[in-house]
Amino acid sequence: MAMIDTGTTRLAYDEAGAGPAVVLVHAGVADRRMWDHQFAELAKDHRVVRYDWRGYGGSADHEGPVRHHEDLLALMDALEIPEAALFGASYGGAYAVDAALAAPERVNALALVCPGMSGHVWPEVFVRTGRQMALAAVPHVRLAAYQEGNADPDPADVAAMADAQARFMVLGPGRSPDEMPVEAWDLSLLMLREMYARRWSSPANHTRWPEHPAVDRLHEISVPTLVVKGLSEVPQVQDVADLYQAGIEGARLLELPDTGHLPSVERPGELTAALSEFLKELPRSPGSTS
């Protein structure tokens, strides 16, 4: 792991390979380790960077609102990457899209894996189910205190929330952990435990979304785009993938059966193969050879 100063924060990252640049942006229920397989394989013929969001993994804490898409562009600046393909998962996909809209000359392709979207309003059923999941794992009084940040969370609460979130988001409705490879389930739980322990004990922060969100601007995206969705994950998240496929001209949709919210962990070989093929089809430009 290396650390780099972007001018506003310090981000932990890994870099490998040479050739056209690819930046991997992790999901909110994970950290950069979710890209282990893709990072190693894509680096055989690309310059690949993966990093932890501010407040995640090895990156610095931050109190208050965070513009994660600006951190992504600042990381590219600090690493002297003028142009890259951005591969983002979950809310990492939303940040990749927001970066592409903010600086279209910096992004030559997008791969959006089970993505979120800035400006998207989640249906009440999704919000209610998520709230019920959280409160079933950790009682309201303790959960409210943890969400204020700078807390000393009970390790049992951290474990309970990680397990509940893994079942709700990573697996998807009606699935059990034995339907995932053991190593995938174990990594998912580990990342979630570390995420909740860090979030609850660190200064409180939240995402500050762009003033002009992606939900109304998908027609502005003209770069090659691959959208990936797991057919076993929460239906409302699958719906967002469909919005991207319909809203971005020429976007391709890859559906993965029996797959939840983290295909990079659950179906690493299959996802890597799809991403590799997508990269092979991209036109090469001078700016992409850094």
Image (cartoon, grey):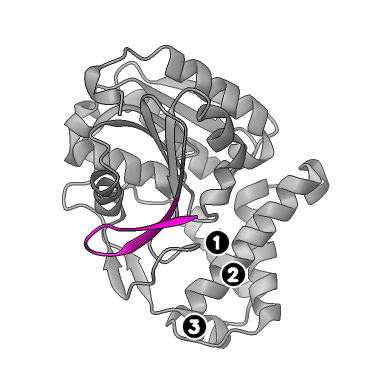
Q: Is residue 184 left or right of residue 81?
A: right
- Which element type, helix, strand or loop, lies under badge 1? helix
Name the residue: 57% across, 60% down.
Answer: 129
Which residue is the site of mark 2?
134
Q: Position of residue 210 (x, y in %)?
A: 21, 52
Q: Is residue 38 magenta?
A: no
Which residue is the site of mark 1?
130
Question: How busy is the neighbourhood of tag 1: few (under 14 within 10 Å), some, or many (20 plus)?
Answer: some
- Which element type, helix, strand or loop, lies under badge 2? helix
Q: Is residue 53 visible?
A: no
Q: Quadrant of residue 93?
A: top left
Q: CA distance from mark 3 to mark 2?
A: 11 Å
Q: Position of residue 240 (x, y in %)?
A: 43, 38
Magenta range is: 1-13
Label whose residue precedes the other's in the sequence (3 or 2):
2
Name the residue: 26% across, 31% down.
Answer: 83
Instruction: Residue at the far right: name it.
Output: 178
Question: How busy is the neighbourhood of tag 2: few (under 14 within 10 Å), some, or many (20 plus)?
Answer: some
